[in-house]
Amino acid sequence: MTLRPSSFLIATCATLAAGCLFAPVAMAETAPAAGPVTLKDHIKPVLEKYCFDCHNDKKQKGDVNLLSVADNPKLEENRKIWEKVAEVVEGGDMPPEKKPQPNDSQRDLMIKFIDGQLSKSDCTGPVNPGKVTIRRLNRAEYQNTIRDLMGVDFNPEDFPNDEVGYGFDNIGDVLSLPPMLMEKYMVAADEIVHKAIVLDTEAKREVKRLAGDQFLAKDPAAIRPLDNKTLGLYREAEGVAKYSAPRPGEYLFRVRAYGELAGPELPKLALRVDGKEVAVFNVGNEVKAKNYEARATLPAGARQIAVAFLNNYNDANNADPKLRGDRNVFVESVEIQTPPGGAPALPESHKRLITRMPQPGQEHEVAMEIIGRFLPEAYRRPVAPAEVERVAKFVELAQKNGGSFLEGIQTAFQAALCSPNFLYRWELDPASAKPGDTRDLTDYEIASRLSYFLWSSMPDAELFALAAKGELRKPEVLEKQVTRMLHDWRARALVDNFGDQWLQIRNIWDVAIDPDTFPKWKDELKGAMKEETERFFEAIIKEDRPVTDLIDADFTFLNEDLARYYGIEGVKGKEFQRVTLPKDSPRGGVLTQGSVLVSTSTPTRTSPVIRGKWILEQILGTPPPPPPPDVPPLQEQKQINQTTSVRQRLEQHRSRAECAGCHAKMDPLGFALENFDATGAWRDSDGKFPVDPSGKLTNGTTFSGPRELKKILKGDKKFVRCITQKMLTFALGRGLERYDKCSVDAITAKIAPQGNHFAALVTAIVTSDPFLKRRPEVVAKN
């Protein structure tokens, strides 16, 4: 399993790759005699004949002395050495490829003995659940929590980037709080409370927003809504929506729209009320949508509001390149502002947070009521009356300084949003805790772990209610909540924050594809490729499919542009749609999706090394050690690229003894994907060289191309174990330690009979000891 890196393991791997750890043995080729396998009788003879020459008291290659550990039956006392022995034997790395190989029974004997002995010490008795460092909310968690707590959208785009540890940005050990970030929190809190709570509650103009998809058309081929609620107008036609004018007077219309330019003039968009034209806008090709305003005097009552495209244009064959193209216009929304009058239009956030206003003399009572309801949600736990009183004093202080009651509430909420109780995910241990103690998490702590795992946000009302009843730790309750939460729209956060980081597809933005090398490439494809993977991952979650379908499946999500780029026919339109892949398609699963293929390439060529390393790390959970520091990069000169293939140039690395072992693991996996170029497009040749997608694993398994590789990976138990490790790391917010192997074993054993379905994996994680318990942080006393 993937544990904390160790310089010892790296040095050992480099040495053992070039040396001899497991040479051919002269012991019996059949199973050992009846009775227990022992280190003295069955393992030491192998080491004595074939390993002690290189790893003894005097000659310790890689600083490894196997002679010194061969007489100690307590393998756990020399864990690192024995774990490495099992790893290289199981991976087929030893003996080296050109030397005689042990048979399968000999390898199995060694692996099972070492694994069994180490597991005895780790998994006998209570499981160590580990301890999670107190950690602040990362940017995504902060944004989502503000959304669900305050009812407003706030994008912390100017917050500093979160540090990443163990592949994720929610790891407590690296989420520090620099002074600059604290300043950002204070500024953000001020902005948030002013968005959420309206100070001037007197009657003002009301604003009604009609989203683009609320405008209906007679001809859906001419006008149809996009997935983001924007209305697309592709031909000359109009979309109509109903509106009720509350009073007579002058109304302000604000049409938010953008256009696609083509031909000699800008797209023309008309605004109509009850069939009468109010205004015609020339819609520019904006990077972002722009507001276009018009005014009209209306009587009270039911009205019909329409937006109409007036000058459609589509000419793909014009002799003038500037006149070619397809003119379209897109309407995000139409806002209608009423004349003054009527009751004040308060935002939902205000109505939710400010449940009543005080009469004279009731200010403290009402402040305690409002704040007493807010703090348990903000702090994600019950709060004592003294805590409420302390925050309520800000209301009193604001009023003493001439402020209003609502200004005081804003100040109180701002203080709460800057409190460590909000900014950090607390799991407070008792003062009496001793080293080695294990405690159960409270129901409120479980609620927070569960919601931030699946939603990257605070618990909702149902989780809080279950926590208050003390029922959340019951396995059947947790299983029910997992099902509910995975089908909630907020579970998209699991795709964005776990899926994107596990698959490393956020890196796609960092790869600057060379347009000279790939003239058909368009940077807009990056967003489409990333969305394909995200929608595919979301389907695995929502449909509760086996996690192995992530490796290979018969469907994906494409729009017309991406489908055309992939060479898949029959997909029309800009909207993404589920597509069943042809039986002979090499696509299917994350390995062959553009987001992964581009993210694991260089700007000018594919990289079998990067792709192979990605598979080892993210799919099999067996990352190779770093390369030696003096290894030169592949030569990229144009003349070299024309005379040698990538496979041939990689031979310079494979020819070095200290590189051969790791390249033997990585390169074959990457070669299987060589039919996909650096942009994710299919190819049959690398320049003038035919693509050779064949490979051979260190255990002797041969394959050719992505379909055969995916079949091998889908059937490899290492993948289920790897995604379990990755998801457990994300769920806990800490790196896995060696003792977590017991929990990983238990989780994978539990979900295997259930078909390794996604919900089963999540349920097994949230009902595991590491998720429901913790070792307290104990500070040594002087």
Image: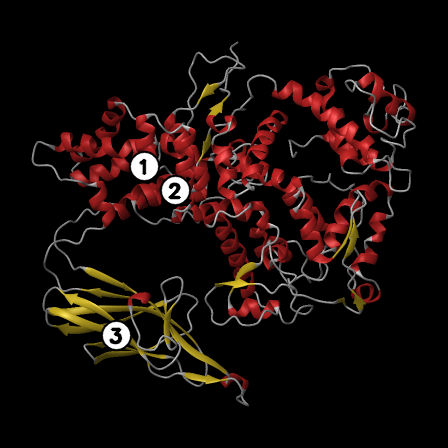
Q: Identity of the amino acid at label 1?
A: Glu
User: Can you name the residue that lies furthest to the top here?
Assistant: 782
Residue 264 in the image: x percent, y percent? 44, 86
Residue density around tag 3, few if under 14, some if 14–19, many if 20 or more, within 10 Å = many
Tally of marks: 3
Describe the element under mark 2 as helix, strand or loop: helix
Describe the element under mark 3 as helix, strand or loop: strand
Residue density around tag 2, few if under 14, some if 14–19, many if 20 or more, within 10 Å = few
C-beta proximity under 8 Å, tags 1 and 2:
yes
Distance from Cα at disc 2 to Cα at disc 3: 39 Å
The label shown at residue 462 is: 1
Tell me which numbered mark, 3 or 1, is placed earlier along the sequence. 3
Which residue lies under the disc numbered 3? 306
Locate residue 707: give its quadrant.
bottom right
Q: Is residue 677 above or below residue 52?
A: below
Residue density around tag 1, few if under 14, some if 14–19, many if 20 or more, within 10 Å = few
Q: Identity of the amino acid at label 3?
A: Ala
- Kindly identify the residue that appears in the image at 66 percent across and 19 percent down: 120
The label shown at residue 484 is: 2
The nearer-to-camera label among 1 and 2 is: 2
Residue 256 in the image: x percent, y percent? 32, 67
The nearer-to-camera label among 3 and 1 is: 1
Q: Identity of the amino acid at label 2?
A: Arg
Tell me which numbered mark, 2 or 3, is placed earlier along the sequence. 3
Distance from Cα at disc 3 to Cα at disc 1: 41 Å
Distance from Cα at disc 1 to Cα at disc 2: 10 Å
The quadrant of the rendering that contains the N terminus is: top right
C-beta proximity under 8 Å, tags 2 and 3:
no
